[in-house]
Image (cartoon, helix red, strand yellow):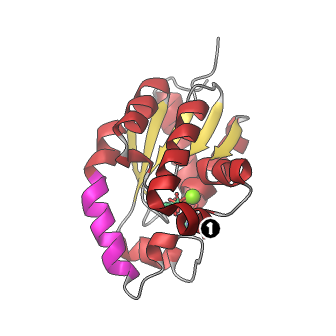
Amino acid sequence: MNKQSIFLVGPMGAGKSTVGRILAEKLGYEFIDSDHEIEARTGVTIPVIFDIEGEGGFRARESAVIDDITQLPGLVLATGGGAVLSADNRRHLAARGFVVYLRSTVPALVQRTKNDRNRPLLQTDNPEAVIAHLLTERGPLYEEVADLIVDTQQASVFRVVRHIQDQLVREGVVA
Ligand SMILES: Nc1ncnc2c1ncn2[C@@H]1O[C@H](COP(=O)(O)OP(=O)(O)O)[C@@H](O)[C@H]1O
Ligand SMILES: O=C(O)C1=C[C@@H](OP(=O)(O)O)[C@@H](O)[C@H](O)C1
Ligand SMILES: [Mg+2]
């Protein structure tokens, strides 16, 4: 029987890429990061895609990756923070796997994403305001698709991984 895949959603800096990789290792699952998959398919970085094709072009590529990858069993998928903006993406995520929402506070997210040049949406003189606005806009969308919500602001990466593992066993998602 195919192992149900696990999809991580949440804002920039929540830990989807970091926690996802370690969680996949612990579970013996394949790990896929949708941003990395987009970069592999295009041969360029996320900021270059935003420069050339705009956010709209990026979102189209992101949706194609989400539709493809969510059909695969036995993996941990780290989505990008804006993946939930698309209703089709939300439908695929909710229907095809177990969705974990890594939730955090604005101060923690600001702290974890500062000085990172790979997030085009945060290359502004007020990243805190952008992060707060995106959380207000997208928070309900993360909650809509989540099977499990994990608050990460006070926990280490390893504590978050262990908590998710325990919950996955409790819910019968993993053995
Ligand atoms: N629970 C946590 N506690 C402390 N630092 C964290 C935590 N989760 C992630 N980080 C750090 O925050 C930064 C962003 O994490 P990342 O996995 O890239 O987030 P996302 O993929 O959700 O944008 C990384 O430097 C990561 O090590
Ligand atoms: O929140 C967003 O709209 C984005 C989040 C990023 O991924 P992370 O959440 O892994 O940083 C990446 O997909 C892109 O920069 C857009
Ligand atoms: Mg990431």
Q: Residue at x 44, y 55 (%)?
A: 56
Residue nearest the viewer, comparing 70 with 29: 70
Query: Which SS class for mark 1?
Result: helix
Main secondary structure type of the part rendered in magenta: helix
For badge 1, the amino acid type reads Val
Quarter of the image that includes the C terminus: top right
Asked whether residue 145 appears in the rendered view, the answer is: yes
Residue 147 visible from this viewpoint: no
Q: Which residues are magenta?
A: 127-139
Q: Which residue is mark 1?
A: 48
Left or right: residue 146 compared with residue 62: left
Residue 106 figure quarter: bottom left
User: Could you say where residue 49 lies in the image, as x and y percent from the top left?
Assistant: 59, 62
Residue 4 appears in which quarter of the rendering?
top right
Q: Nearer the viewer, residue 175 or 67?
A: 67
Q: Is residue 54 left or right of residue 41?
A: left
Where is 66 relative to 38, above or below?
A: above
Residue 78 percent across, percent down from the top left? 57, 47
